[in-house]
Amino acid sequence: ILDRSLAPGAPVSIPDLSARLGVSHIPVREALRRLASEGLIELRRSRTAIVAPLSVEDLHDVFRLRILIESDAVANAIKTYDDDDLTAIDEAWERLEIAPDDDAESVAERHVEFHRRLLKPSPWDRRLLDTLWQAGDRYMYLILNEVMALGPRDFREQHRPLLDAAHARSVRAARKATAEHLQGGMGLI
């Protein structure tokens, strides 16, 4: 689902998956229930499933929750930054520059790395953020296609307020920069 080899709305066959993976139907059904709880699969009657369709409403729900949780997590992390944390954030920010031969997948990896460097989440923050990031991954490639059209410098510069807040170690600026950054991504779809 996340690598887009199963398209939104595609049927998911329990017997086919069981045969392909060489396991019984029981672990496949359990896995599908878990994916359904993460919003990636929709379970249907008659024990069938489909890949959850993409929707603007879903994207907005995911980003609304990310704004709440991620803004708070970044603000909490800023209070604990040391010089090594700032160096790692700087290095990740430098890697955000897009080269002409970059593909969306490599840009997405570097983008996630930068955002993860800003965080030092508690275990519960990490669990919730991982679920939200995974749900948002399906939209990330759509957003990155729009962003990559802006050009290398613009993409990296969109993250400068986050970098500046980190260096200022400003909780208020970090909350604001995180919320505005995520709202900006949401606005591209």
Image: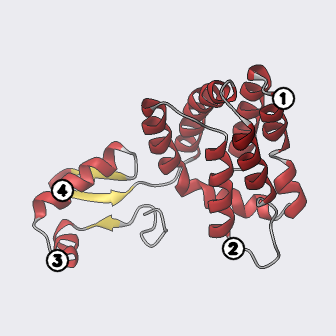
**N-terminal-most mark, 1 or 3:** 3
Q: Give the side of residue 131 with respect to residue 144, left or right.
A: left
**Residue positioned 83% across, 47% down in the render:** 158
Residue 137 figure quarter: bottom right
Picture layout, residue 66 above or below residue 99: above
**Pair 1/3: label in front:** 1
**Residue positioned 59% across, 29% down in the render:** 73
Q: Is residue 187 visible?
A: no
**N-terminal-most mark, 2 or 3:** 3
Give the Cα separation between the discs numbered 3 and 4.
Answer: 13 Å
- Residue that protrudes farthest toward the right in the picture: 153
Picture layout, residue 131 above or below residue 147: above
**N-terminal-most mark, 4 or 1:** 4
State the mark number for residue 19: 3
Q: Amino acid at mark 3?
A: Ala
Q: Give the side of residue 18 with respect to residue 57, left or right.
A: left
**Pair 2/3: label in front:** 2
Give the Cα separation between the discs numbered 2 and 3.
Answer: 33 Å
**Pair 4/2: label in front:** 2
> Does the CB distance between marks 2 and 3 fall below 8 Å?
no
**N-terminal-most mark, 1 or 2:** 2
The image position of residue 108, as x and y in percent, is: 64, 61
What residue is shown with label 4?
29
Give the Cα separation between the discs numbered 1 and 3.
Answer: 55 Å
What SS does tag 3 mark? helix
Q: Amino acid at mark 2?
A: Asp
What residue is shown with label 1?
168
The image position of residue 141, as x and y in percent, is: 62, 61
